Amino acid sequence: MAMPTQVIVSASAEQPRWGFDASHPLAEVVARLHRAHGDASTTRNIGMVACAQCWEQAIRADERLAVEFELPALDIDPDYVDTVAVERACKSDTSAVRLTPAERRTAVAKLTAQGLTLNQICRRLRIASRDVRSIQGGGRSGQSLRLAIRHSKAVAR
Ligand SMILES: [Zn+2]
């Protein structure tokens, strides 16, 4: 099970966005694992979080889960859109589906493209008209709305 440190470090080349430190999405899990085996020393830890074995264990477990549930591995893209959640939110009878900002943008774009009015969109997604307008007005950027519209059309197909 033990993996040489250099193998783990080289694996980070495949995920250049995440270093193996406290900002890694699995860092909390890794730190918990590490505490559980009672090794309090931090000198040989990677990223001041945990030893190589704990990093490996957490990352392997995460990959296994991802495979088992057919999830994208380590899905931490803030622009990731759960299309099922968006679909649910866009149906009027929803019991408040929680959407991420990216999903909300997609849902607003989708309903806008369907010709719904501002008020209808607010009611359906249960968000303030100010928020809908800011998304329709471009949100973070006009491009993200265009992307969201394109995405929602692709989903509707
Ligand atoms: Zn450890």
Image: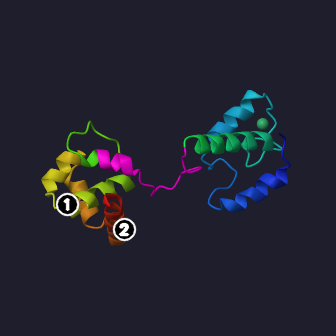
Q: Main secondary structure of the magenta part?
A: loop
Secondary structure under tag 2 reads: helix
Residue shown at 36% from the left, 46% from the top:
85
| Residue 27 visible at all | no
Image quarter where the C terminus lies is bottom left
The residue carrying mark 1 is 114
Q: Name which residue type carries label 2.
A: Leu
Read off the magenta span: 70-88
Residues packed near mark 2 inside 10 Å, few (<14), some (14 to 19) or many (20 plus): some
Residue 47 on image: x %, y %: 73, 49
Work out which residue is located at the far front of the displayed protein and give it.
Answer: 157
- Colour scheme in the image? rainbow
Image quarter where the N terminus lies is top right
Residue 113 on image: x %, y %: 22, 63
Position of 99 with respect to 32 (left or right) is left
Q: Quadrant of residue 67?
A: top right
| Residue 155 visible at all | yes
Position of 114 with respect to 16 (left or right) is left
Residue shown at 71% from the left, 57% from the top:
12
The residue carrying mark 2 is 147
Q: Mark 2, mark 1: which one is toward the viewer? A: 1
Q: Name which residue type carries label 1.
A: Gln
Disc number for residue 102: none
Residue shown at 32% from the left, 53% from the top:
104
Q: Is mark 1 within 8 Å of ligand 1?
A: no
Residue 41 on image: x %, y %: 82, 36
User: Any magenta on residue 87?
Assistant: yes
